[in-house]
């Protein structure tokens, strides 16, 4: 079982907290060259620009290279964390198979790459007024070199964080006694913050006060008898029964994955409805990871999707503005119609993968209880 692989590593949840912080710090360090380059180009005017405008400040190939460089730094940090802090093999965060299945990676890659090429070709043929030929040989060849080298690193980081590292980390944590209380605390923080914050305009000061209050509440919760007393209640037993299932890490990682895209320029252009697509993508990638007992298909699919997008079509309102072959100059669809076709295709992809890899026992693989292997040495610690 893919999630249960995490039990064989050092999996105390504080290690995952440290690991996530390390990845964020590495990402921040990796973004320094891009930040410096943008600041040199625009000076103090950068504060007045939207996220979409910032993506267009630098020459597209330079912009893409500097943006993707931060993912290289973060992926290296994550692999170091997995190897030394968790004492786990990278293979075991990737798959339950004896070795990483490159055939699955290439199948996932080819499936989305070929379909996107076909659909874009049909749309260009029937609606040529929506596109501008953007092809310029030398910049395109440079783009190919950068994209082929670094975009798989960017997508691999996201997959290893969400479908590998956090999927296993949340899975191993979900069966612990404190997990239901931790979930209730996080829900309290999110609901109270978003309910109260709109009534204040303190900005950074309000955020600092809120963090202090939430920190004090957290200390109060976990330095008193509250966790022990709560664990003896029927509510705790009910929540523990519900949360200690594979659907818990699937749901959390998918929602967080989607939420991480909230500040993309596409959200400003299309509207918040696009979040259904981002979260739906998270669920799709999480489902194929759990059903296939490994993240090879997700690695290939994600890389293929981002690579073909970077090389084939760009637009002024997308997060990646590149020297692609075509430039989309049409107004994007808004409302649910903007995301419905993609969600339908996710269903088609699931059907194809189910047929090819003979997936079965969906209920158990997606909603079954998480059970630590007897040989993991974890049962005595619960």
Image (cartoon, rainbow, N blue to C red):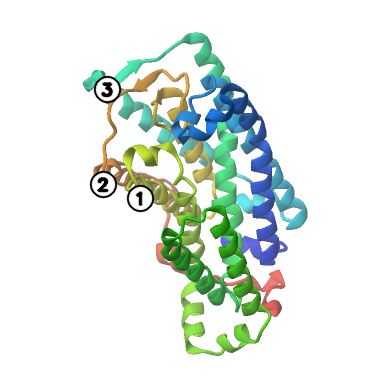
Q: Secondary structure at mark 2?
A: helix
Indicate which disc, 2 or 1, sits on the residue closer to the N terminus: 1
Residue 99 shows in this picture: yes
Residue 57 screen position, x and y as percent: 51, 24
Indicate which disc, 2 or 3, sits on the residue closer to the N terminus: 3
Q: Secondary structure at mark 1?
A: helix
Residue 134 screen position, x and y as percent: 40, 15
Q: Is residue 111 left or right of residue 94?
A: left
Q: Is residue 47 left or right of residue 69?
A: left
Q: Residue furthest right?
A: 84
Residue 369 shows in this picture: no
Q: Which mark is residue 276?
A: 1
Cα distance between the residues tagged 2 and 3: 21 Å
At a point 56% along the width and 70% down the height, the residue shown is 174
Q: Which residue was labeled with disc 2? A: 336
Residue 218 screen position, x and y as percent: 62, 73
- Could you say which quadrant of the image residue 148 lies in? top right
Q: Residues within 10 Å of mark 2 (few under 14, many from 20)?
A: few
Residue 186 screen position, x and y as percent: 52, 68
Cα distance between the residues tagged 2 and 1: 9 Å
Query: Given contact means CB atoms under 8 Å apart, are the residues at marks 2 and 1 in contact?
Result: yes
Q: Which residue was labeled with disc 3? A: 130
Q: Which quadrant would the N terminus be assigned to in this image?
A: bottom right
Q: Residues within 10 Å of mark 3 (few under 14, many from 20)?
A: some
At a point 72% along the width and 51% down the height, the residue shown is 81
Give above or below for 302 relative to 368.
above
**Front position in the image: 234 or 35:** 35
Give above or below for 46 relative to 18.
above
Give above or below for 244 relative to 209.
below
At a point 58% along the width and 53% down the height, the residue shown is 164
């Amino acid at each position: 079982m893919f999630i249960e692989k995490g039990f064989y590593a050092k999996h105390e949840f504080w290690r995952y907290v440290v690991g996530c912080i390390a990845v964020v710090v590495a990402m921040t360090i990796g973004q320094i060259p891009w930040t410096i380059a943008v600041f040199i180009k625009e000076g103090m005017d950068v504060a007045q620009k939207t996220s979409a405008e910032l993506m267009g400040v630098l020459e597209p190939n330079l912009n893409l290279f500097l943006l993707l460089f931060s993912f290289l730094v973060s992926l290296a940090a994550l692999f170091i964390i997995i190897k030394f802090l968790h004492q786990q093999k990278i293979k075991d965060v990737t798959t339950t198979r004896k070795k990483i299945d490159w055939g699955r990676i290439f199948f996932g890659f080819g499936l989305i790459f070929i379909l996107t090429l076909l659909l874009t070709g049909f749309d260009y043929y029937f609606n040529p007024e929506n596109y501008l030929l953007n092809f310029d040989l030398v910049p395109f060849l440079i783009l190919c070199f950068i994209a082929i080298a670094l975009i798989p690193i960017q997508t691999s980081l996201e997959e290893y964080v969400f479908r590998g590292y956090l999927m296993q980390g949340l899975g191993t944590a979900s069966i612990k006694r404190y997990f239901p209380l931790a979930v209730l605390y996080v829900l309290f923080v999110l609901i109270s913050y978003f309910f109260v914050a709109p009534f204040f305009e303190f900005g950074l000061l309000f955020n600092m006060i809120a963090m202090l209050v939430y920190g004090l509440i957290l200390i109060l919760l976990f330095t008193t008898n509250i966790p022990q007393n709560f664990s003896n209640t029927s509510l705790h037993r009910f929540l523990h029964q519900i949360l200690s299932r594979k659907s818990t890490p699937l749901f959390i990682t998918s929602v967080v994955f989607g939420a991480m895209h909230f500040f993309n320029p596409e959200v400003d252009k299309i509207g918040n409805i696009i979040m259904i697509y981002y979260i739906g993508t998270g669920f799709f990638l999480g489902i194929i990871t759990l059903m296939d007992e490994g993240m090879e298909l997700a690695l290939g699919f994600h890389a293929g999707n981002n690579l073909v997008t970077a090389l084939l079509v760009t637009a002024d309102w997308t997060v990646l503005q590149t020297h692609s072959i075509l430039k989309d100059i049409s107004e994007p669809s808004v409302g649910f119609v903007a995301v419905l076709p993609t969600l339908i295709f996710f269903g088609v992809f699931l059907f194809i993968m189910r047929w090819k890899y003979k997936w079965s026992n969906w209920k158990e693989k997606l909603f079954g209880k998480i059970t630590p292997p007897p040989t993991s040495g974890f049962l005595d610690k619960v």
